[in-house]
Amino acid sequence: SCPEGWHLPTQSDWSELFRTLGGKVSAGIALKSTKDWQKSVFDRDGKNATNASGFSALLSGSENRNGEFSYDGKAFFWGSDYYNDSLAYFMGLRSDSDEAYLLGEHKDNKYSARCLKDNPSAKNEFVGKKALPIGQTNQQFVDVRDGKVYKTVTYGKQTWMAEDLLYEVVNDEGCFRLYCQGNGLYTWKTAVG
């Protein structure tokens, strides 16, 4: 679950991020870290992962509700909105697609989480400064629950964690760190806190 002062993004938050980055295809390319994505056999022209946004999405895999882990060229991030009692929305990135997308999936699956800073209406001191382009910031945030330091990145009035949440939650099975490569995976219920 996100630290105090931060929240799991809504579909509207994700959509605003996509718009800010030029649409779903531009966002999909700009959100992916340059690490590992370009090594995919699906990378036709070497441009499907630029990290131009500074969001630094890593291939993190996922675990389905049956406990089967998959690390096949994807990163999924929970959103706070739910479709019904069984399904909730997530943002997805795949090696075989340039597009970022929003879909619904079973709440018991385990995906990564990125948190968004509360109070999006607060004035952003970085907006309009050419010295600090969109998506490039040296801001950091310390999670007081465990002392973990997260890089953050700001787009317009949104400030996002530029790293996957890695808070160890009691009573959440999470995934094996060996498979997650240091990225935490959470059920939707745990992610929304």
Image: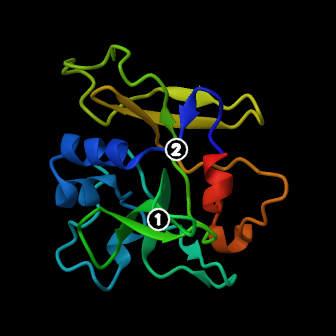
Residue 185 percent coordinates (x, y): 63, 62
Q: Amino acid type of disc 1?
A: Phe
Q: Horizontal placement of 149 versus 29: left or right?
A: right
Question: Where is the N terminus found, in terms of image quarters?
Answer: top right
- The residue pinned by badge 2 equals 8
Is any part of residue 35 visible from this angle? yes
Q: Is residue 53 visible in the rendered structure shown here?
A: no
Residue type, label 2: Leu
Establish if 180 lies above or below 169. below
Specify few, some or many for label 1: CA neighbours under 10 Å numbering under 14, 14-19, or 20 or more. Answer: many
Q: Is 190 left or right of 43, judged from the image as shown?
A: right
User: What residue do we see at 24% from left, 66% from top?
Assistant: 99
> Residue 56, how many percent across, how many down?
42, 51
Q: Which one is nearer the viewer's eye here, 174 or 192? A: 192
Rendered image: mark on residue 137 = none
Q: Identify the image quadrant of residue 155.
A: top left
Residue 37 quadrant: bottom left
* Residue 174 horizontal side relative to residue 37, left or right: right
Which residue is the site of mark 1? 76
Residue beneath the point at 30% across and 19% down: 126
